[in-house]
Amino acid sequence: MLAAGKKANELNHPVVFDSVGAGVSSESISSKINGKWIAVAVTAIGIAGAIFLPLYDITDFLYFIGSVFAPMIAIQIADFFILKKDSAEKSFDIQNLIIWLIGFVIYRLLMKVDFILGSTLPDMAITLVICVAVNKIGKLCKKTSKN
């Protein structure tokens, strides 16, 4: 029990910061959600997880997080910095969702390849190129169909 208490104490600060972030994020999804109660719930789940779950090997979890966020960030970089695309009015962009799914699969495939840069950077580069190419091809198709 002492080891579990020590583990919970070590994770205390990240759990609190993540909990507040979860609360604020949940409020942006719906104004009916009370972010403070979400933060309390996430804190309780985080502390319980730190005490009861075997968190000594989280490698698979970290790879999963990388496979989710690497293509997502690549799409955001492509949209904002390269394509200068503003999708703020959309709840989601189906085209980017499909590109993200492709990037996710590519990341998982790249994990099986022993590459000096790992999986993240190549996946981000490939996803970024796919995103830019799909958007440029989409614009060309729209122009030709109008003429």
Image: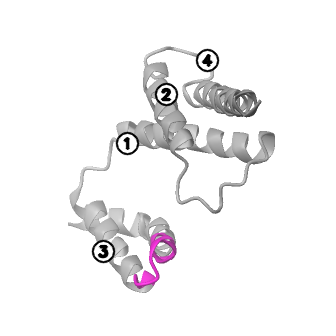
Q: Rounded to the nearest whole Å, what is the CA distance between mark 3 and mark 2?
A: 32 Å
Q: Magenta segment: does it hold 28?
A: yes
Identify the residue position indicated by label 3 in the image: 44
Quickly name the residue at label 2: 107
Q: Residues within 10 Å of mark 2 (few under 14, many from 20)?
A: many
Instruction: Say which amino acid is labelled 4.
Output: Ile
Marks 1 and 2, Cα distance to the nearest angstrom? 14 Å
Q: Determine the CA span between mark 4 and mark 3.
A: 39 Å
- Lower position in the chain sequence, tag 4 or tag 1: 1
Quadrant assignment, res 5: bottom left
Q: Amino acid at mark 1?
A: Phe
Q: Is residue 145 magenta?
A: no
Quick check: marks 3 and 2 in contact, CB under 8 Å?
A: no
74, 115: nearer the viewer: 74
Q: Which residues are magenta?
A: 22-35
Q: Residue 94 or 75: which is nearer the viewer?
A: 94
Q: Nearer the viewer, residue 54 or 34?
A: 34
Badge 2 marks a residue whose secondary structure is: helix
Residue under the image location 68 percent in, 34 percent down: 135
Neighbor class of circle 1 (other Cα within 10 Å; few <14, some 14-19, many 20+) is few
**Which residue matches tag 4?**
116
